[in-house]
Amino acid sequence: MKKYLILLAFALFIGSNSYAQGIEFTHGTWKEIKAKAAKEDKLIFMDAYAEWCGPCKKMARDVFSQKEVGDYFNAHFVNVKMDMEKGEGIGLSSDFGIQAYPTLLFINSDGKVVHRAVGYHTTDLLIDLAGAAKDPNRNEGSITARYDAGDRSPELLRNLATARYDAMDGTYVRVADEYLATQADWSTPDNLSFIMKMTDDLNSKMADYLLNNRQLFEDKFGKETVIGKVDELVQNTISHAESEADLTKVEALYAKTYPERAEEMSGQLKMGFYAQREDWKNFAKVADKHFKKFPPEDWTVLNDIAWLYYDAVDSKKELKCALGWAKQSVKLDKNYANTDTVASLYYKLGKKGKALKSANEAIALAKASEEDYSETELLIQKIKG
């Protein structure tokens, strides 16, 4: 490990051609690090990471190594990297409630977290985050204490909502609503930015405002950005949908937002809803209707769903639907994979003669394209057995 660290430091030195690059991380026990912070009257910046975390490695390589970041953090913080799955990190992970990586913590010398954020941060975002940690009017610890003491000033509510959003603390929505309740005009540039960032639930006043004033947001952020935001809200709703009533709300949104594609998108929505619940009976009803009206151009879409039914469903009614999809796939592009699916579905439906014929066709196609057809040979053995 020491050899690796030395080589890494040397590589950074060669790449930068400078002696003053990047964050200088302190080594030592947690007790020693807190003592150093107390002596220097600084906050501790902790990069709480895991060895397997890709974004953690990317931040270490592309952000922590920057001179601008190093100059700021080395001057204002005692910096430490801590693997949350090894050594002292295991206990600290529990103490600090680490749930995702990377988590970026700012901690006082008593060991209390005063500010935090989760996820990859660019150079500018990281420096802004550090500035917030040092500012009593912006760091989560200070403003939470003021909030708990009864302060409900607009500035505090806005800063607290932002801090909790960055920390992936789900209570940020409630605080965001409190802030907006203090605002007579939601259409100011700052408030539009705030709503765009904070909205994550279709069933909210913020989402209603965004959808009812879509042009305001498109003028500020661009049409594609707003479309992306609406899609994000829809996907959040789908992933948390618990009943068909939830689907009705999303369908109404489609009709309002994408009138030219609403019917097609609603069919896709319902298929996803029933697939997540492995409700293959209702999925088949929706999918059969959907594919007849909006036939896919990609043979793999139909083949993959047909094979899924072969693997997961026993009902002959649904299997017949799947056979229809597989045959539709063959019409788009006849190949070994979808012809084998047709053979498998015929076999499961008890039509051994048709299954054998399709299986032999699949093998002939596999030989022509030099594909492995051993699974189809096993199917033939079952058909003949």
Image (spheres, rainbow, N blue to C red):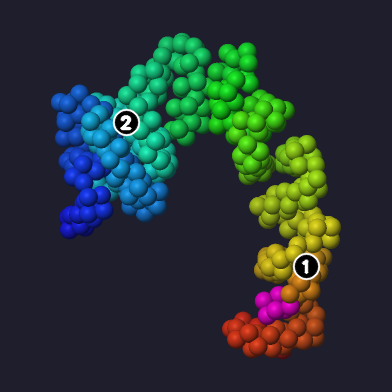
Q: Mark 2 points at which residue?
A: 106
Is residue 276 visible in this depiction of the protein?
Answer: yes
Q: Does the magenta stretch include residue 68?
A: no
How many circles with numbers are drawn on the protein?
A: 2
Q: Which residue is labeled 1 in the image?
A: 325
Q: What stretch is highlighted in magenta?
A: 334-341
Quarter of the figure with residue 213: top right
Q: Amino acid type of disc 1? A: Trp
Decide: few, some or many residues near mark 2? Use Cα within 10 Å; few <14, some 14-19, many ≥20: many
For residue 109, say whether it is visible.
no
Which residue corresponds to the image point at 16% horizontal and 35% vertical from the top-left? 32
Q: Is the magenta stretch mostly helix, strand or loop?
A: helix
235 sits to left or right of 89: right
Question: At x 63% / y 21%, what residue is drawn?
Answer: 187
**Foreground: 93 or 172?**
172
Amino acid type at mark 2: Phe
Residue 210: x %, y % from top left: 67, 29
Identify the element where label 1 is drawn.
helix
Front residue of 291/333: it is 333
Q: Position of residue 204 (x, y in %)?
A: 65, 28
Q: What element carries label 2?
A: strand
Q: Is residue 177 left or right of residue 288?
A: left
Q: Which residue lies furthest to the front in this view?
A: 17
- Give the x, y percent position of residue 207: 66, 30
